Image (tube, grey):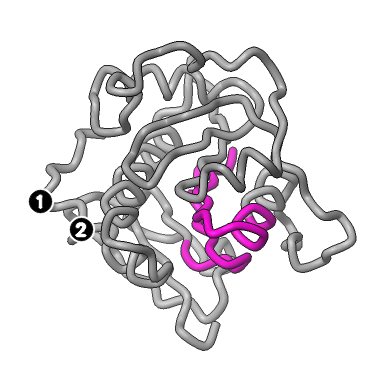
């Protein structure tokens, strides 16, 4: 997938950002992270589909509610090299997405950690959506217990966005849905985006 020009990102992913009600600074980062997530969903790695999780914003709280699964591959690198807008770093992130755990991203687009295990409150049933696994539960939980927005890439190649503990959008990296039953977003408005070759499903305000 060709990287979408900055002046087109908002046109493509703006409806998702609008639904999250994020700040203007986080909006640009969120759209960049969603674009990266769609690339991972489309491309996979080494011929295999992979899943991963990004949390955007409220870094200190997310770190406090998570723990490292492995030695952090981002530790010790200059922060100016770790921004989602850098093409070279995006390729590195695609490689690291094969590792277990979540990426933690600041509102300004700087990645601060990788390979984090997000603690999930298993007693809170609202963190779990039927048919989705632990990665999505972690995304829902982190967005519920912090002010972060979670972007989850599933191994079925669908990107899901959570804010305030709610599933607010799904991005399908193909233009035509084979079935609406693939979608789990409540009361979704389905928006084909031909210029990006994908379909957005964004929850209604009452969803």
The image quarter in which residue 22 lies: bottom left
- Is 77 on the left-hand or right-hand side of 113? left
Q: Which image quadrant: the N terminus? A: top left
Q: Position of residue 124 (x, y in %)?
A: 83, 64
Vertical position of residue 204 compared to residue 20: above or below:
below
Secondary structure beneath label 1: helix
The image quarter in which residue 101 lies: top right
Cα separation, mark 1 vs mark 2, equals 7 Å
Instruction: Say few, some or many: other residues with alpha carbon within 10 Å of mark 1 (under 14 / 14 to 19 / 20 or more).
Output: few
Q: Position of residue 144 (x, y in %)?
A: 64, 62
Q: Nearer the viewer, residue 49 or 14?
A: 14
Magenta region: 140-169
Vertical position of residue 3 compared to residue 186: above or below:
above
Instruction: Say few, some or many: other residues with alpha carbon within 10 Å of mark 2 (under 14 / 14 to 19 / 20 or more).
Output: some
Q: Residue at x 86, y 55 (%)?
A: 122
- Is 116 on the left-hand or right-hand side of 188? right
Residue identifier under label 1:
7
Residue identifier under label 2:
10
Vertical position of residue 31 compared to residue 170: above or below:
above
Secondary structure beneath label 2: helix
């Amino acid at each position: 997938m060709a990287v979408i020009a900055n002046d087109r990102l908002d046109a493509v992913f703006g409806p998702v950002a609008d639904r999250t009600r994020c700040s203007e600074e986080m909006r640009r980062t969120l759209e960049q992270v969603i674009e990266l997530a769609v690339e991972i969903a489309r491309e996979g790695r080494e011929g295999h589909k992979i899943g991963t999780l990004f949390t955007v914003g409220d870094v200190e709280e997310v770190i406090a509610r998570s723990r490292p699964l492995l030695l952090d591959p981002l530790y010790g690198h200059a922060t100016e090299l770790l921004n989602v807008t850098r093409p070279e770093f995006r390729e590195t992130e695609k490689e690291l997405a094969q590792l277990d755990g979540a990426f933690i991203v600041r509102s300004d687009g700087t990645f601060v950690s990788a390979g984090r295990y997000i603690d999930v409150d298993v007693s809170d049933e609202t963190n779990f959506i039927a048919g989705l696994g632990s990665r999505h539960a972690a995304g829902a939980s982190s967005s519920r217990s912090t002010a972060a927005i979670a972007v989850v890439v599933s191994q079925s190649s669908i990107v899901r966005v959570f804010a305030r503990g709610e599933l607010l959008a799904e991005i399908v990296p193909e233009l035509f849905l084979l079935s609406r039953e693939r979608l789990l977003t409540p009361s979704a408005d389905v928006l084909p985006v031909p210029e990006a070759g994908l379909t957005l499903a964004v929850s209604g305000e009452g969803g």
